[in-house]
Image: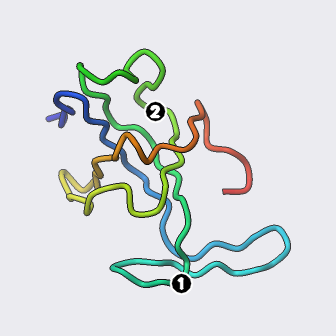
Amino acid sequence: MKIRAIGKNILAVMMETGERKTAGGIVIPSADKGQESGIRPRWCQVYDVGPDSELKDDINEGDWLCVAHGRWTEGMVIDDKTIWKIDLNGILLHSDELPDGI
């Protein structure tokens, strides 16, 4: 069974989680559930794009999105896969592959 996005929605998987270390060695802690430290954009992979999305011609399944902090729903675990709904106004960057260093 494949879950599909409806309307203008975009669904994503593989949300970047946990702490992150910069090239200079600075550790940016994870920010989950309202913590103030570690607030930063996150990369995730597109799972499905809704048929009415104005981005359906630009963003495809398997592409990568950088999304502003907190501009996604709580993840839902379906068939051992966590899926998030992305707020379209929170999309900062788009790439057809995951950028190096992430």
Q: Is residue 60 left or right of residue 101?
A: left
Visual colour scheme: rainbow
Figure quadrant of residue 20: bottom right
For the residue marked with disc 1, what is the amino acid? Ser
Give the vertical position of 81 relative to 92 (above or below). Answer: below
For the residue marked with disc 2, what is the amino acid? Gly
Give the vertical position of 41 relative to 30 (above or below). Answer: above
Give residue 50's position: percent from left, percent from top.
25, 27
Disc 2 is placed on an element classified as loop
**Pointers 1 and 2 in contact (CB under 8 A)?**
no
Figure quadrant of residue 12: top left
Q: Residue at x 61, y 36 (%)?
A: 97
Q: Mark 1 or mark 2: which is in front?
A: 1
- Which residue is disc 2 drawn over? 62
Give residue 102's position: percent from left, percent from top.
66, 57
Disc nearer the start of the sequence (1/2): 1
Disc 1 is placed on an element classified as loop
Give the vertical position of 40 relative to 65 (above or below). Answer: below
Figure quadrant of residue 1: top left
- Which residue is disc 1 drawn over? 37
Give residue 92's position: percent from left, percent from top.
54, 44
Q: Nearer the viewer, residue 78 or 46?
A: 46
Q: Residue furthest right?
A: 24
Q: Is residue 40 left or right of residue 21?
A: left
